[in-house]
Image: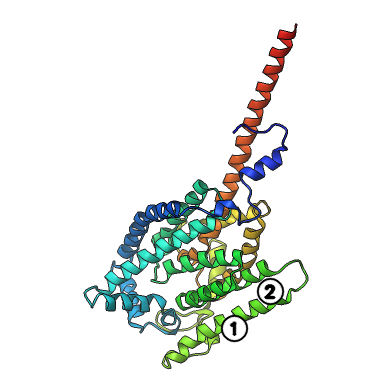
Amino acid sequence: MKPDAKRPTSSIIKDAGECEDPFDRRARTSWRSSLLVLLVLIPPSILIQQLQAEQTNRGGMAEKAFNMYLDGTIGTLFSARLLPAETVGLVQKVSGGRVSSHGANAFVQIVALCAGLFATHRFALLFLANAWALSATLLTACLLPWGFLDLGYASSWPYDFPALFFSAAGMILVLRQRAFLFGAVLILGTLNKETMVWLIPAWFFHAQRGWRPDARAVAQTLLFAVLFYATYQTVRFAHADLYTPLSVTVSAYEVPADGSHPRTPRAAQNLKELVFEGRGRALQNVYLGLAVHLVAIVFLFKLPRSIRRLYWATPFFFLPLFFFGNICELRLYNELLPLGTVSVAFLLQQEWASSTISAAGARAAKTQIANSRTDSGSTR
């Protein structure tokens, strides 16, 4: 279709790239298209899972920790993230014990990863054309291994890939404001990993209209907060040997391996990472792992309003991680990968649309000038 020379360039660009309303026709694809995308995502899911398994099964502490997690003997904080372990046990029961724990875990990880990438694609479709949405999804798949290879400090757990699915699905439900389904995803996601908590303020920012407090948005947010806390603590009440108050299930200090003192505050260690005084080589760098988000933040106001509101909630993810986690473990950012890759793809889509329209407009102007000269010559 030729560009309309009479239409303002800004409106043409918006039609070609910008999607301020994330629920337009681009989000409604046929089942055939969805099935094709799902089939495309299966091979990279298997490949990434195999890479993760090879990294985990090298032996030593990684494999020992994995087995302790499945056995429920690794400690309160990790054992409370019970959804993958219970799912692996269920797969073994269904198979009649013919599948080992490693085999069952491989199946669960492939399904979780494929579901996470598919949910990422559905999230991307809210803002991107089909080709760009698939590109953002494949970029997400390319960045996932960063977290469990040596670049990401070779750390991997069975709940990392499921966290991608629950986060992407949660963001879709936040944007669509589906309270009941969001509550269900919040419960299951919390049983997988407590970092789902960042989606609760994300819900508030999207439910809130204007700057004046909205009673309905506040009530829903408080309800989700209670639901999160109840889910997180119920696991400990159900397993008396695991129960400890929420306030002491996380540690603000990094204790030496031999248990000696002094303990190093995690915040201090993480601050060293941010100023390049931390552990590892130059490529083992938190900034490289967060590069997609740095690009998005620089051009934040060029992103749709819905994506900006999701980014408003990310401090509720990063601040607890800064004080109670290790920011050098890049696997921890799996939940935010869809947000970053979709943002980068959106910016590229906008730039491509603007360049294409500018070039098309220039060609149309040259054609119009040439035609006018031909007409004037024939008149003479």
Q: Classify 38 as above or below 377.
A: below
In the rendered structure, which disc, 1 or 2, sits on the residue that comes first in sequence? 2
Residue type, mark 1 in image: Val
- Give the crowd class for mark 1: few <14, some 14-19, many >=20 residues within 10 Å: few
Image color mode: rainbow
Residue 46 screen position, x and y as percent? 33, 59
Residue 177 screen position, x and y as percent? 61, 68
Camera-side residue of 235 and 263: 235
Quadrant assignment, res 321:
bottom right
Q: Residue at x 40, y 61 (%)?
A: 114
Q: What residue occupies the far right of the structure in this picture?
A: 212
Indicate left or right for 282 with 374 as reference: left
Label number found at residue 217 = 2
Label 2 sits on a secondary structure element that is helix
Q: Residue at x 68, y 54 (%)?
A: 301
Residue type, mark 2 in image: Ala
Residue 46 makes an appearance in the image: yes
Question: Disc 1 marks which residue?
Answer: 226
Camera-side residue of 186 and 229: 186
